[in-house]
Amino acid sequence: MYVSVMMTIHNSLVLLFVAFYILTVDCGTPEEEEGVKYANLCEVCKILTTELEDRLETTGKSHDVLEIGYSVDDVKPKKKTQYKKSELRLVESLDGICEKVLEYNIHKERKDSTRFSKGMSQTFKTLHGLVDKGVKVDLGIPYELWDKPSVEITNMKNQCEKLLEIYEEDIEDWYFKKQGKTSLKQYICADKVLKGKDVSCLSETLSITNEKGDSGRKSKKKKVPKSKPPKEDL
């Protein structure tokens, strides 16, 4: 009974996220008419799992040992566990993870998922260079706002938070049972969030072939297992 209720709640959250995604991404908006292209579900999941795996890799280097348990007389020995295998590490790694999205910028000179990357885009590097040379550049927004997160980035942060809320239990399942056996990106994105959908963005990476900036960069795709098709009810 409990499992059935939890599954119903989880499925309802998934449907709510899909509705949120359609309303904020798929529907035509004035922003999109002005050239704004919001992140799709694959791009959002890719960045969420990339950031979380990076943070877990950092915290996983700790050799701390935690003492768990409490006794009034403090005589019984407390249970000890390694921090890198603890729930505390996961909780701390998840805390504020979607805030990391705000460190990204939109690189409109790229056409695939690498358009969402950290660092200044080649376009803005050029514009800042012109300003430094005394050239007047009018983008329709104050100069001090040039480097603030764009509408695409803030929208992706919101999507990240919704995605995390729905799939947090699946992330916990991977952390305690699948970690080291399969990547978080594969387990969460390909096998769950994007199950039966296009997963091509997950294999797109940025390859630096020229040191002269983004104009000398090409994205390439690594082989990533395809998402499993949804099971049919018997």
Image: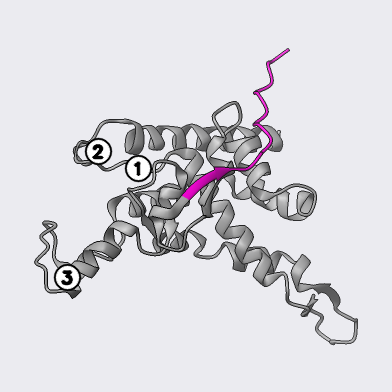
Callout 2–callout 1 Cβ contact below 8 Å: yes
From the viewer's perspective, is 198 left or right of 64? left
Q: Is residue 157 visible?
A: no
Q: Which mark is residue 131?
A: 3
From the viewer's perspective, is 109 left or right of 166? left
Task: Answer above or below: position of 14 versus 96.
Answer: above
Callout 1–callout 3 Cβ contact below 8 Å: no
Residue span colored magenta: 218-234
From the viewer's perspective, is 97 left or right of 158? right
Whether 220 is among the magenta residues is yes
Q: CA distance from mark 3 to mark 2?
A: 28 Å
The location of residue 48, given as percent across then percent down, is 53, 53
Task: In the displayed orientation, state which residue is furthest to the right.
Answer: 76
**Residue type of the residue flagged with mark 2:** Glu
**Residue type of the residue flagged with mark 1:** Tyr
Instruction: Classify residue 102 by image quadrant.
Output: bottom left
The location of residue 160, given as percent across then percent down, is 46, 50
Give the SS element for disc 1.
loop
Instruction: Classify residue 67 by image quadrant.
Output: bottom right
Q: CA distance from mark 1 to mark 3?
A: 28 Å
Q: Which residue is mark 1?
A: 38
Callout 3–callout 2 Cβ contact below 8 Å: no
**What crowding class fits label 3: few (fewer than 14 Cα within 10 Å), some (14-19), or many (20 or more)?**
few
Which tag, 2 or 1, sits closer to the chain's start? 2
Q: Which residue is mark 2?
A: 32
> What residue appears at the point 90 percent right and 82 percent down from the top-left corner?
76
Q: How is the structure coloured here?
A: one colour
Give the SS element for disc 2.
helix
